[in-house]
Image (spheres, coloured by chain):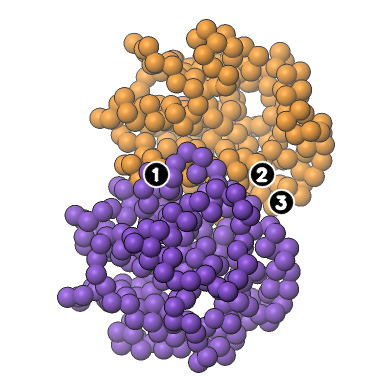
Chain colours: A orange, B purple
Amino acid sequence: MTLKLYTLSAADTARPFSPHGWKAVLALHHKGLAFEEIQVPFTRISEIANGAAKTVPVLIDGETIVTDSFAIAEHLEAAYPDRPSLFGGEGGRAMARFIERWSQTATVAALVPIILKDVHSCVVPEDKAYFRQSREARFGMTLEEVVADRQAAAAAYPSKLDALRHTLKFQLFIGGEGPLFADHIVFGCLQWARLVRPQWLLPAGDPVNDWFERCLDLYGGVGRSAPAAA
Amino acid sequence: MTLKLYTLSAADTARPFSPHGWKAVLALHHKGLAFEEIQVPFTRISEIANGAAKTVPVLIDGETIVTDSFAIAEHLEAAYPDRPSLFGGEGGRAMARFIERWSQTATVAALVPIILKDVHSCVVPEDKAYFRQSREARFGMTLEEVVADRQAAAAAYPSKLDALRHTLKFQLFIGGEGPLFADHIVFGCLQWARLVRPQWLLPAGDPVNDWFERCLDLYGGVGRSAPAAA
């Protein structure tokens, strides 16, 4: 039975921008598993699997329903142990969690004041009111206020990736000589920016660009198949 | 033949403060290896193993001389594969490098403007002139200028550990249910602060404190055997 992956709809269906969706998509490709991707708006997530999920991505694997991108990777690693590993062992599984928390607290948090209004522009029409209302409640200010200092935030953004930049002096991927789920995690974050914001955030010559290009090329170029925001 | 580990001398021999030395000490204990620790001043590192090293720690394992704490961990993992793993697999080895780079770029860099003058107070008398001169050349200002805003830097410090703090919602150690070299890396950084600065940098109730206490207890309490700065 084909796996089903529910991800977030985008106004431009060629540019599904959800960072967490990309993590799951790359994890499935890494495992070499066929899957059907079904895009749903924020406001219809409650219709997936009889209300089993509050967020996407959601993976349906036979009788198993898995929500949360990290849990999806853990499920795939346990259910398909003979396929290429997503973690490279138990230590890698534990440290991938650290890298996910770094990605969320250091890099996603730093992107919000840069791209949140761009994200609003990219959600499907039926999600726009929900997106504005939920994010304005979360941040305690209007979307426009969240991104009021976006030029300064964008200028400061490259430094948020210092840990990755310095790691790349030693190895091609966070996972070592080849990619692991830890790469998918950080890729998802930068792919989010690539798909919603026309201006790329890293300077020419930054080694992080070379790593990101390598990630765009993975698994037959699945990441590159979504065109950058223009 | 007993392993020899050269680490940095401290004015108070009970408080060897070098973060990189602690990484190597905990790695050796994790592997359950007996070793002799020899403390040397900065200004006598060139005398170790006929000038083989420019920094400490240095591990002498038979004919093998290993400099750099990460290389020491990699050597121990390769040379003593039947002992408890320091990385938990190849993915963990790769991701430990990311965590080391995070520790250096995010947390050690943030400690320098807080504790650099305290470190100067703790080096052995014969190192004081070298330490001042080399650090003032590196930072382009006096030690006193580096730490001029130390109160503000100390107040901002806890946020630098957000990635670790959030990881601890999921697991006891960076390495998962038990410690790995990634824990030793970040422990070394905070142990440095503990041994040179009388005021602890994290607020009561911070889950990072609980993790740090667990690390102080490891391997028979080797970390705790060095008393905190007073």
| Quadrant in the picture for residue A11 | top right
Q: Is label 3 on the same chain as label 2? A: yes
Check the residue under mark 2 and report the chain it is in.
A
Mark 3 neighbour density, 10 Å: few (under 14) some (14–19) many (20 or more): few
Q: Chain of mark 1?
A: B
The amino acid sitting under disc 1 is: Gly
> Is A124 in front, or is B161?
B161
Residue B167 coordinates in the image, percent (x, y): 50, 43
B128 left or right, relative to B56: right
Mark 1 vs mark 3, CA separation in Å:
35 Å
Which disc, if any, is residue A155? 3
**Which residue appears farthest toward the bottom when viewing the image?**
B126
Quickly name the residue at label 1. Answer: B176
Q: On the same chain: label 1 and label 3?
A: no
Please give the label number shown on residue B86: none
On screen, residue A143 versus residue A174, left or right, reads right
Query: Which residue carries the number 2 mark?
Result: A110
Mark 2 and mark 1: Cα distance apart in space = 27 Å
Q: Are marks 2 and 1 in contact (CB under 8 Å)?
A: no
Q: Residue at x 44, y 54 (%)?
A: B214
Q: Is residue B8 or residue A136 the one in the foreground?
A: B8
Q: Amino acid at mark 3?
A: Ala
Q: Nearer the viewer, residue B116 or A96?
A: B116
* Label 3: element kind: helix
